[in-house]
Image (cartoon, coloured by chain):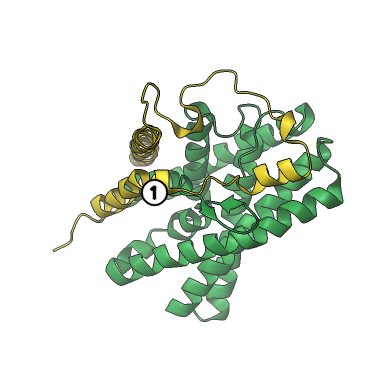
Chain colours: A green, B yellow
Amino acid sequence: MHIPDGFINAPVAVTTGAVAVAVVVVAVKMTNKKIGEKQVPMMGVLAAFIFAAQMLNFPVVGGTSGHFLGAALAAILLGPWSSVLIMSAVLVVQCLIFQDGGLLALGANITNMGIVASFSSYYVYKGIDVLLKHGKTGMLVGAGVGAWFSVVIASLLCAAELSMSGTSPWGIALVAMGGIHVIIGIGEGLITAAVLSLIMATRADLLKLQVA
Amino acid sequence: MKAKWWIAGLTIALLLAIISPLASTFPDGLEKVSEDLGFIDRASEAAYGLMPDYAFPGVENKAVATILAGILGTLVMLGLGFGVAYVLKKKNEA
């Protein structure tokens, strides 16, 4: 879902760029307040894992592929603000070193896949976790559904940005982007729940590192 | 004894980078939509290219180029994530 340059116009690029900068500044402050010794290696390993996992596109339907995003996993493990920092770091490196995602579209990509994906997945996860009374099932179901939701909502926001830029008509862009990401999101949900269940089985203490 | 969990995590990430040539070459969701709806031509080339398409420069073998780019990117991310967290933690203690 990395938007290349040319898909969005200047007003959309500037607006999303401003949103991205403002939220990342807050994320730095929020993370700085609570981060401790234990979170440092987790941020490094999560950033590395998310980058590597994003390279592995998996085929879905009709000659389309999807790949893991990772915002939900980071938000559940470290909290949404730290997740914004991790996702932004991944997106900046993908943009600057690998030319994946446009330079002028970086703000939009951070807004969609960093900010909105992190917060939406986190609150869906939290809601389901509370409903299912904080059990293991609640955590894994919440993670899966939250992760699915993060991909769908990010894709709809991406479609909205394309439409606002005059690249594609609203209805068509929303249906096309939403339609394929409803399916890609299932992969996100499964991978997120699988990674969390692996951590749960091996190092359950690492599930208690949420800072911000 | 507590094993170094983060070494296990990093190993998994590097293994993913090593198998990255197996990734599907189908266009991703947005790329496919841009093809189907006919706006893919609007995409402009990057102003510069360090390692476009996750290919390490100067390596003939495509799979090897992808693996090298993947390992490099994974290590860069480890350093960057660790570095940002370390600086924020230091500021926190100050």
Disc 1 marks a residue whose amino acid type is Phe
Which residue matches tag 1? A49
Where residue B55 appears, as percent x and y from the top left, is 43, 30
Going by the image, does A57 lie left or right of B59? Answer: right
Residue shown at the point (43%, 58%) measured from the top left = A77
**Which one is nearer the viewer's eye here, A181 or A36?**
A181
A153, above or below B83, in the image = below
**Which one is nearer the viewer's eye here, A62 or A207?**
A62
Where residue A75 appears, as percent x and y from the top left, is 50, 56
**Disc 1 residue crowd, few under 14, some 14–19, many 20+, Cα 10 Å:** many
Q: Tag 1, which chain? A: A
Where residue A43 appears, as percent x and y from the top left, is 38, 47
Q: Quadrant of residue A135?
A: bottom left
Where residue A191 appears, as percent x and y from the top left, is 46, 62
Residue shown at the point (53%, 68%) measured from the top left = A144
Residue at the left extreme, as displayed: B1
Give SS at disc 1. Answer: helix
Residue at the top extreme, as displayed: B48
Q: Quadrant of the N terminus of chain A?
A: top right
Can residue A135 be seen by looking at this rendering?
A: no
Going by the image, does A143 lie left or right of B9? Answer: right
**Which one is nearer the viewer's eye here, A211 or A118?**
A118
